[in-house]
Image: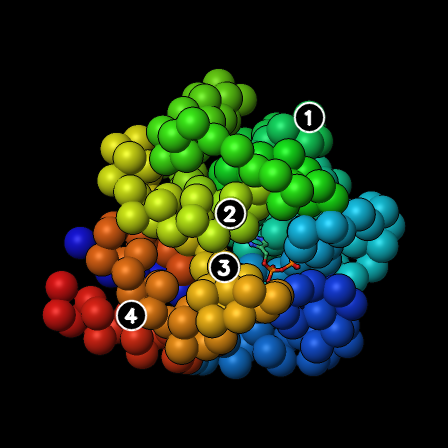
Amino acid sequence: MQRPAVMGVVNVTPDSFSDGGVHVDPDAAAAAARLMIEDGAAIVDIGGESTRPGSEGVSLEEELRRVIPVLERLEGLPVSIDTAKSEVARRALELGVELVNDVTALRGDPELAGVIANGGAYLCLMHMQGEPRTMQADPRYDDVASEVAAFLEERLAFAVSAGIPEKRVCLDPGIGFGKTPAQNFELVRRLDVLLALGRPVLIGLSRKSSLGKLFDPEARTGTLPASLGAAVAAYERGASIFRVHDVREHVEALTAAGAIA
Ligand code: HH2
């Protein structure tokens, strides 16, 4: 079993579903990212656009205004950029960012694949059914695990054909992106179907509403203990990268799980 790697989340947004408004000041965002690295994060994911259910997206100018000052303050540290925009990625890579986390899996901006290939960056390809504005309306699958795997296999082939080496790509089933709680849990339960593609799997369960809904049908976020339990369950099924808001707690939980594994 691979050692678990934790990706800390810093959303430089007013409206992210769980940390919206917390890190809008660039000094505060950079300080939060540094603390996550001290707490054991392998990388910190900086995002300037919320993709929560119902969100509309932001302009290029606004996204740059949010993330560039933070990236400037983090030069030399392990950072990824959560963006679907090639210009944001290009500027981020110039500032030393190592990984592009694209929730559209290279279906959004046609220039993005070239920017990643030329910059020699790592890439996370994520599955999403529909788009954030409407994706939770009525998600449907015949077989969620095999449909998500087929999508990611096709997107991986596309990335490789665009010049991004396969060994630089990780795959993510996109927990909460056009999926019911039952579909999210089935994806984790059947992670072997994704692992068969031969790439590391990243999972973002942290604070997601599927976890909260186990206890309260109206919940919009999940609790920390539920996030930790779900991360360990995903680790035991082969996930190796964990995108989380509470870094120290996940590092401890996953280190314990890793010691037993
Ligand atoms: N989840 C969110 C955003 N980006 N990227 C990947 N690869 N996987 C995920 O599961 C994922 C992601 C949503 O969480 P968050 O960033 O906390 O919220 P928001 O999109 O509202 O900013």
Cα distance in 3D space between marks 2 and 1 = 29 Å
Tags 3 and 2 touching, CB below 8 Å? yes
| Mark in front: 2 vs 1 | 2
Name the secondary structure under disc 1: loop
User: In the rendered structure, which amino acid carries the disc numbered 4?
Assistant: Leu
Q: In the rendered image of this protein, does residue 43 appear above or below residue 189?
A: below
Name the secondary structure under disc 4: helix
Q: Which residue is mark 4?
A: 254
User: In the rendered structure, which amino acid carries the disc numbered 1?
Assistant: Pro
Cα distance in 3D space between marks 4 and 2 = 26 Å
The figure's colour scheme reads rainbow
Q: Quadrant of residue 255?
A: bottom left
Front residue (pair 51, 223): 223
Q: Is residue 250 visible?
A: yes
User: In the rendered structure, which amino acid carries the disc numbered 3?
Assistant: Ser
Dot 2, crowdedness within 10 Å: few (<14), some or many (≥20)?
Answer: some
Mark number for residue 110? 1
The mark nearer the N terminus, 1 or 4, is 1
Name the secondary structure under disc 3: helix
Q: In the rendered image of this protein, does residue 75 appear above or below residue 56?
A: below
Mark number for residue 180? 2
- For the point 29% across and 48% down, which residue is it? 189
Count the numbered circles shown: 4
Front residue (pair 46, 107): 107
Q: Quadrant of residue 31?
A: bottom right
Cα distance in 3D space between marks 3 and 1 = 32 Å
Q: Position of residue 59 (x, y in %)?
A: 85, 47
Q: Which residue is mark 3?
A: 210
Quarter of the rendered image showing ligand 1: bottom right
Cα distance in 3D space between marks 1 and 4 = 37 Å
Mark number for residue 94? none
Q: Position of residue 161 (x, y in %)?
A: 48, 18
